[in-house]
Image: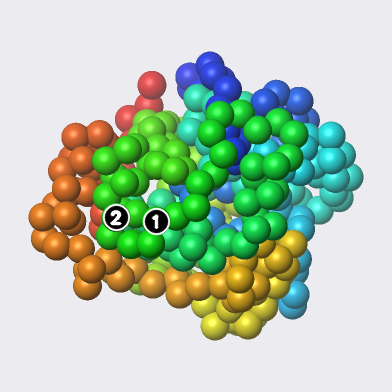
Amino acid sequence: MENYSWPKKIREIQSHHFDSTIWNGFKFRDDDIVVASYAKSGTTWMQQIIAQLLFNGAENVPVAEISPWLDLRVPPANIKLPAVEAQTHRRFLKTHLPVDALVYSPKAKYIYIARDGRDVVWSMYNHHVSANEKWYAALNDTPGLVGLPMPKPVDSIRQYYLDWLQNDGHPWWSLWENVDSWWNIRHLPNLLLVHFAALKRDMEGEIRKIASFLDLPSAELNWEAILEHCGFDYMKAHADQSAPLGGIFWNGGAKTFIYKGQNGRWRDVLTEEESKMYEKKAMDKLGEECAHWLMTGEAVKPEHHVQQ
């Protein structure tokens, strides 16, 4: 591993959601797992998969409780870090940061899950429009807010998409810098890239790859239970285990947080020109190879894994 050039943290990101400084004091264990993504890209699904692999198909694993979004600004570090440090199972944590705002451990395992940005926005809009006043209060009325508060969403999902696309992720953060930062380190031996569409096409095959990457003995795993518990129907029925604080921040509760898990809903809303705007932006920001992977979920070819 000493032959690799490991990422270095070069900046902090602080906003209505983020406080990247929490990673500066984090004490890694060699077997830690970090789930990374842009928001609404399948992060909760990946956390459920890892939980099921680690706990071998157990019922009712409290994923939201034991796998926190570490760089979320609330609750603060002095509450979150001791709770994570006290965990005795193999830890799996969540981040939405780009690589250059993260402390990167050469010994931990990282799984980055991605999704077409148009599908991200459709899921994000549901998340945002269903949020209640408790959600806004947690983000905007607590100590440590940096920058502008989180605004209410516009009424039109088409306008929400256009604002997000034309203003580099507004009112969230940049998709392009997030995806590009993880794509650029895809050669590292402790990083696995996974795509939401690939999981939809072949969930069992992808989960078996994840198990192998995490050095889990496939022959000893209860695959029937694991695959059942990673399916959308099971997750929807047990949404209170996946949604933060059981879903209290969303109208409709946890079942609103675990919404549809579908791709392509934008096709019935966006014009061809509005959709092509996204594709052109992806190409300009990410380059042809990464943009194609982000839009289709096609496997990254081995010849593209060039070591530094």
Give the left or right position of residue 174, taking residue 81 as reference. left
Amino acid type for the residue under numbered disc 2: Gln
Residue 135 sits in which quadrant?
bottom right
Against 53, residue 259 (above or below) is below
Q: Residue furthest top?
A: 10
Q: In the image, what residue occupies the spot 41% across and 51% down? A: 114
Residue 57 place in picture, x, y as percent: 69, 74
Q: Do the numbered discs 2 and 1 sit on residues whose CB atoms are within 8 Å?
A: yes
| Residue at x-position 53% and y-position 56% | 43
Which residue is label 2 attached to? 159
What amino acid is at disc 1?
Val
* Sequence order check, earlier mark of 2 and 1: 1
Q: Quadrant of the C terminus?
A: top left
In the rendered image, residue 75, in percent from the top left (x then y), is placed at 76, 43
* Label 2 to label 1: alpha-carbon separation: 7 Å
In this rendering, does residue 196 appear at all?
Answer: no
Across and down, in percent, residue 126 comes to 46, 65
Q: Nearer the viewer, residue 74 or 211?
A: 74
Residue denoted by label 1: 154
Residue depicted at x 30% and y 70%: 265
Element assignment for label 1: loop
Does residue 238 sit above or below 3 in this rendering? below
